[in-house]
Image: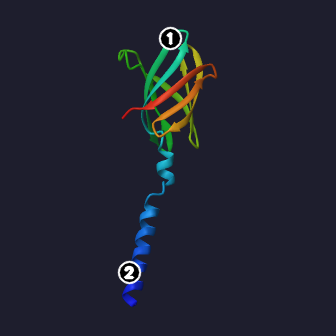
Amino acid sequence: MKKASILFIALFFGIAINSFSQITTPASKADFFVGKWEITIYGTPNGDSKMVTEFVRKDGKLTGELKDPTDTTKPAIPITSIDEKDGEIEISFSASGYDLTLPLKKEDDDNLKGQLMGMFDAKAKRVK
């Protein structure tokens, strides 16, 4: 009987430890946006626009720059600010003399969706 109760307690703790190890920690939630993303903005006056960015966390804040994947000679566009909320991100940058904002919401683990300045649909896909 004593062996059975010890076995039951060991089994219970094994299951409990395994289930706790699968819980997402706040640090990994905060780092969802970190990595390389391909952003496509649809229907701009110059046609669909593609940009690539790599978000990096420095001193607790996201930073990055936007690059044209088709023309590596163009200078990168610096991102002036990035605001994070739970499952949402808002990227601010300047292009063609305009200050622009691009809010994006998480659709799934590898896709984001939003609108540039509330006018042009945008999608972002994680580059693996």
**Residue at disc 1, secondary structure:** strand
Task: Classify residue 35 by image quadrant.
Answer: top left
The crowd level at tag 1 (other Cα within 10 Å; few <14, some 14-19, many 20+) is few
Q: Residue furthest top?
A: 46
Q: Position of residue 124 (x, y in %)?
A: 48, 29
Question: Which quarter shows the C terminus?
Answer: top left
Q: Position of residue 126 (x, y in %)?
A: 42, 33
Label 2 crowd (10 A; few <14 / some 14-19 / many >=20): few
Residue 75 sits in quarter: top left
User: Residue at coordinates 57% horizontally, 28% vertically from top-left?
Assistant: 114
Residue shown at 63% from the left, 19% from the top: 119
- Against 76, is 45 above or below? above
Report the amino acid beneath label 2.
Leu
Q: Which residue is mark 1?
A: 47
Dot 2 falls on a residue whose secondary structure is helix
Residue pushed farthest bottom?
1
Q: Residue at x 37, y 16 (%)?
A: 70
Q: Relative to 72, does residue 35 appear above or below in the rendering? A: below
Q: Mark number for residue 7? A: 2
Of 114 and 19, nearer the camera is 19
Q: CA distance from mark 2 to mark 1?
A: 66 Å
Q: Amino acid at mark 1?
A: Gly
Q: Would you identify the image quadrant in which residue 7 lies?
A: bottom left
Locate the N terminus by quadrant. Answer: bottom left
Q: Residue at x 38, y 20 (%)?
A: 69
